[in-house]
Image: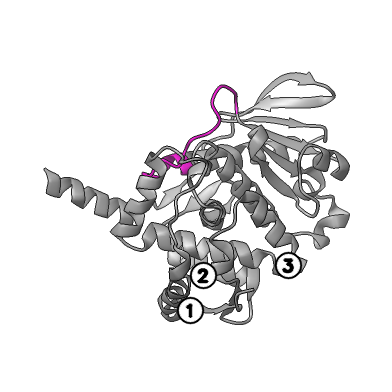
Amino acid sequence: MRALLLLLVSIAAADPLPREIVPEKATLVAQPGEEGRKVWHTRFFRIDSDLELRPNDLLRLAQVADTTATAVKAHPLPLFAPPQGSRPRIAIHARTSAYQEAGGAPGTAGMYVSRQALVLIQGDYLVRSPDAARSRLAPRNDEDLVVHELVHLCMHRTNAKLPQWLIEGLAEYFASAHAGAGRFSFGNMDQVIREHLRIRLSPDDPGIPLLPVADLIHLDGRGWLQYLNSLPADERYRAYATSLLLAHQQLHGGKERIEALRLALSAPPSNGRPAVLIAPETAAATQSALIRYWKPKGLTLEFAPTR
């Protein structure tokens, strides 16, 4: 019996998610408006907005949101832990000033605000006018932003147990697997991540510029934002790319790593301190291991010097 359990754990570590998650038809129920904001309920979430949303845009957002929750819930690790006592909230703001007053950081288009258990989205980023289409990311990338932030919300009660690099890396892991309109593909995550990083960072070169592991592993949520703000705007995604590769290593790097994550998720938070899954003295070895793993898979990882 024990051998069977160990085998099942090993299988879960090697292939943790269904190969494909296909969205169900969107569920959207209008609710009474509040303070000039329209309100809808999906299967999992409450969406409220002061921006007039076209029906198709709203239905697509609901579909992406609910399937993201389904994907996080499908993971055999206990990642799915949304807020208790209220329906998780997605708030869309038409004005940048209102977005920032609600807790959105300057320079961001979407944000998970942990103390309020909500996801904020700038409406002009999510719903583009034809004149602005060329100045922003493609619709799929807009949806990937939503997926990233919603994974944070779906993991609301587990986030305190995990280091920030892994919180961000797991959110980007699901975002990279998002193929658009709420469809997720987990069948070949190595290929998915390779293509995701090539598109985002280096479409014409196998070299992938990354940030030092040692710079990221000690950051908490506030430190993460401060670190990002210290970087040029066009280099900030490198932090998420580095965390994505570290999260992939944690999930697919063998039984020892997956069991360490399982223990971190099942243990109560210790004095507000998250689990240490990468010790500072192993940061350089971790980078070397990532370089060796991804080189034959078509990515040349280029880590910047420690700051």
The first of marks 1 and 2 along the sequence is: 2
Q: Quadrant of the N terminus?
A: top left
Badge 1 crowding class, 10 Å Cα cut-off, few under 14, some 14 to 19, many 20 or more, is some
Magenta stretch contains residue 149:
no
Distance between the Cα atoms at labels 3 and 1? Answer: 27 Å
Q: What residue type is disc 2 on?
A: Arg
Label 1 belongs to which residue? 298
Above or below, comparing residue 236 to residue 11 in the picture: below
Distance between the Cα atoms at labels 3 and 2? Answer: 24 Å
Magenta stretch contains residue 86:
yes
- Examine the image and state in which quarter residue 13 appears: bottom left
Q: Are marks 1 and 2 in contact (CB under 8 Å)?
A: yes
Residue at image point 53% right, 33% down: 82
**Residue 263 or residue 90, whichever sits in front:** 263
Element at label 2: helix
The first of marks 3 and 2 along the sequence is: 2
Using the rendered image of the protein, determine whether residue 138 is visible from the camera's viewpoint: no
Q: Residue furthest top?
A: 32
* Percent position of residue 280, x then y: 48, 66
Q: Is residue 252 left or right of residue 173?
A: left
Q: Is residue 15 left or right of residue 150?
A: left
Span colored in magenta:
71-87
Label 3 belongs to which residue? 231
Label 2 belongs to which residue? 194
Element at label 3: loop
Q: What residue type is disc 1 on?
A: Gly
Nearer to us: label 3 or label 1: 3
* Percent position of residue 44, x then y: 56, 30
